[in-house]
Image (cartoon, rainbow, N blue to C red):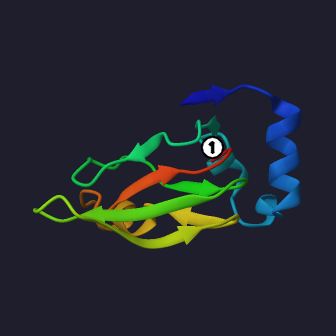
Amino acid sequence: MEELHDESLFSSYIKAHQLQNVFHKTLMLHVSLWRYQQGELICSKGDKREYMYLLVKGKLKIFTTTKEGKTFILCFKNPLEAIGDIEYVKQTDMVQSKLFQKYIC
């Protein structure tokens, strides 16, 4: 995972998804752009969640693993979808794992 400090790239995603109409200017000061490599876990089941993510490019696989070690794919996320929003609002641990398939959150 890598935080991107590219203001023009950040602005292009904000404009492309019309997020300037969604988030108040003061909230935008707390928004950042992160890049994940393919196959990299964004979070795992049981992780404490301090942030909410918006997928702006790429594809994300949401899955869970049973006690027996079997993995079940629950869904795929595509832009523009929220990740960890329910856990963030409820202040609970992550209930599923999120594996990055392609590019940027």
Q: Say if 102 sits above or below 72 in the image.
A: above
Viewport quadrant of the N terminus: top right
In the image: residue 89, left or right of residue 82: left
Q: Work out which residue is located at the far bottom of the displayed protein and give it.
A: 74
Q: Say if 23 sits above or below 75 in the image.
A: above
Q: How many labels does the image show?
A: 1
Task: Identify the residue shown where x is 63% and y is 58%.
Answer: 59
Task: Identify the residue shown where x is 28% and y is 60%.
Answer: 91
Q: Where is residue 26 in the image (x, y as percent from the top left)?
A: 66, 47
Task: Identify the residue shown where x is 51% and y is 42%.
Answer: 39
Residue 3 location, quadrant:
top right
Front position in the image: 16 or 26: 16
In the image: residue 6, left or right of residue 75: right
Q: Where is residue 69 in the image (x, y as percent from the top left)?
A: 17, 58
Secondary structure beneath label 1: loop
In the image: residue 27, left or right of residue 44: right
Question: Pointer 1: residues within 10 angstroms few (<14), some, or many (20+)?
Answer: some
Q: Where is residue 20 in the image (x, y as percent from the top left)?
A: 80, 58
Q: What residue type is labelled 1?
A: Val
Q: Say if 82 sits above or below 8 in the image.
A: below
Look at mark 1 in the image and give the residue it sits on. 31
Residue 33 location, quadrant:
top right
Q: Where is residue 17 in the image (x, y as percent from the top left)?
A: 81, 62
Task: Identify the residue shown where x is 79% and y is 40%.
Answer: 10
